[in-house]
Image: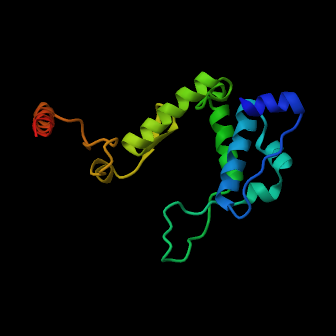
Amino acid sequence: FNLEEKLNEHGSVTLYTCPGREQARSNAAVMLGAYLVLRHAWSVDRVVDALGAEEAARRFICSFATVNRPEPIRNLRIQECWAGMALARDRKWLDAKCVTDRASVTAACRRHRRMVDQFDAAWLIPGRVMVAADPTTTSVDPNPATVKYVFPPTEADRLEMMMKEKDVADS
């Protein structure tokens, strides 16, 4: 919303990222392109023209790469992220309204954060296709926000949880 206000006020906005922070720059480029695709219905080609082919060709580092091994080949390009947003917009998998008003953005971010925190999952196509981490690993994660069962708990599981909570409260 600040971006839209600044564009209306000044006609243009310059986006700066910290020098040497390649991932921050890539993330900013994805978000700016996604904004243009969703809010202003730009094509991917128009975003590439505006932000530059060099920016569009940047590739993301593997999120689970370890420092004690050589970095794996980078595959995902920023332009492909923009193309995914355009596809989701065109197929109505993503409502462009999610970037038009503060309430919609806030609600979408809360839903996404809850899914990531609780289930280590995210919708690719809302209500149809979800990607998730290994459910067993997620269920044993010590983070109290994550789900604790791979399958919905039975009545016996619920009673056991209640007894454990009662024991903790009594001690």
How far across and down, in percent of the image, does residue 5 sit?
79, 28
Residue found at the very far right of the displayed protein: 11
Question: Is 63 drawn above or below residue 141 in the view shown?
Answer: below
Q: Residue at x 55, y 63 (%)?
A: 62
How far across and down, in percent of the image, does residue 110 sit?
49, 32
How far across and down, in percent of the image, does residue 28 sit?
69, 48
Question: Is 64 drawn above or below residue 82 in the view shown?
Answer: below
Q: Residue at x 85, y 27 (%)?
A: 8
Q: Residue at x 58, y 31 (%)?
A: 93
Report the side of 44 relative to 95 (left or right).
right
Q: Is residue 41 visible?
A: no
**In the foreground, 137 or 128:** 137
Q: Is residue 19 visible?
A: yes
Q: Residue at x 73, y 31 (%)?
A: 2
How many marks the image carries: the answer is: 0
Residue found at the very far front of the displayed protein: 171
Q: Quadrant of residue 145?
A: top left
Report the side of 27 relative to 47 (left or right).
left
How far across and down, in percent of the image, does residue 26 sit?
68, 55
Report the side of 49 relative to 109 (left or right).
right
In the picture, the quarter occupied by the C terminus is top left
In the picture, the quarter occupied by the N terminus is top right
Q: Quadrant of residue 39?
A: top right
Question: Is 84 drawn above or below residue 95 in the view shown?
Answer: below
Coloring applied to the structure? rainbow
